Image (cartoon, rainbow, N blue to C red):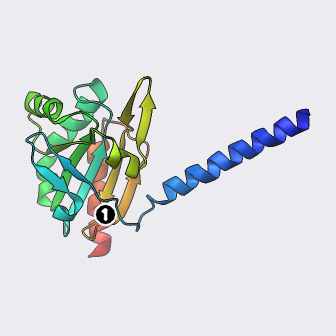
Amino acid sequence: MMRSRITRSCLAVLLFAVISAGALAGMEPGTPAPAFRLQDQNGEWHDLERYRGRWVTLYFYPKDDTPGCTTEACAFRDNIFAFEDIGATVLGVSLDDVESHAEFAEKYSLPFSLLADMEGEAAENYGVLSDYGNFQVAKRQTFLIDPEGRIARHYTSVNPSGHSEQVLADLKTLMAERS
């Protein structure tokens, strides 16, 4: 009986690992980035096809106007000219609504689009949707999407301080490798 429980537990853990690995495998470099159609803080619609031909930094974050999310957003803001100079677009995504994004962007003078994924569909498609107590949030993860619409890099462990600089350096390296 005890051996049966241990075997079932091991199988359950193994099954979870296989399913998790399969979900993450879809975000491997070279795979197509999932499509999305979301409104920004100004009510303007954005979809991935709009950015075809450009590098995109698509960063998911849990919640507007919280300490880590503010640190990360302000770092991207402070480096926005460097991203623009190399032809890269920065897009932030959370499950907050358009109004929350508008207040957050205005409060911190954020010069890039914050996309409202209120249903969590984009977060789910990118594998970053997470339950947090009684509600859902997007995990803090970033995707670099190449000009052809493929995942070039996926950051699963993000420290809000210094992440923008790391992404910028990696973008420059990826661009140099492809030229």
- In this orientation, which residue lies closer to the viewer: 44 or 160? 44
Which of 80/47 is in front?
47
> Does residue 168 show up?
no
The total number of labels drawn is: 1
Q: Residue furthest front?
A: 119
* Badge 1 density bin: few <14, some 14–19, many ≥20, Cα 10 Å: few
Residue drawn 27% across the image and 71% down it: 148
**SS category of the residue bearing label 1:** helix
Residue 87 picture quarter: bottom left
- Could you tell me if residue 29 is visible in this image? yes
Q: Quadrant of the C terminus?
A: bottom left
In the figure, 38 relative to 35: above or below? above
Tell me where residue 69 sits by quadrant: top left
**Residue most toward the bottom?**
179
Q: Residue at x 18, y 59 (%)?
A: 88
Q: Which residue is mark 1?
A: 173
- The type of residue carrying mark 1 is Thr
Q: Is residue 120 above or below residue 169?
A: above
Place of residue 28 in the rendered image (x, y in percent of width and height, measured from the top left): 45, 61
Which quadrant: the N terminus? top right
Which quadrant would residue 176 be assigned to in this image? bottom left
175 vs 22, left or right, is left
Q: Is residue 127 left or right of residue 110?
A: right
Q: Return the residue nearer the eye: 170 or 105.
A: 105
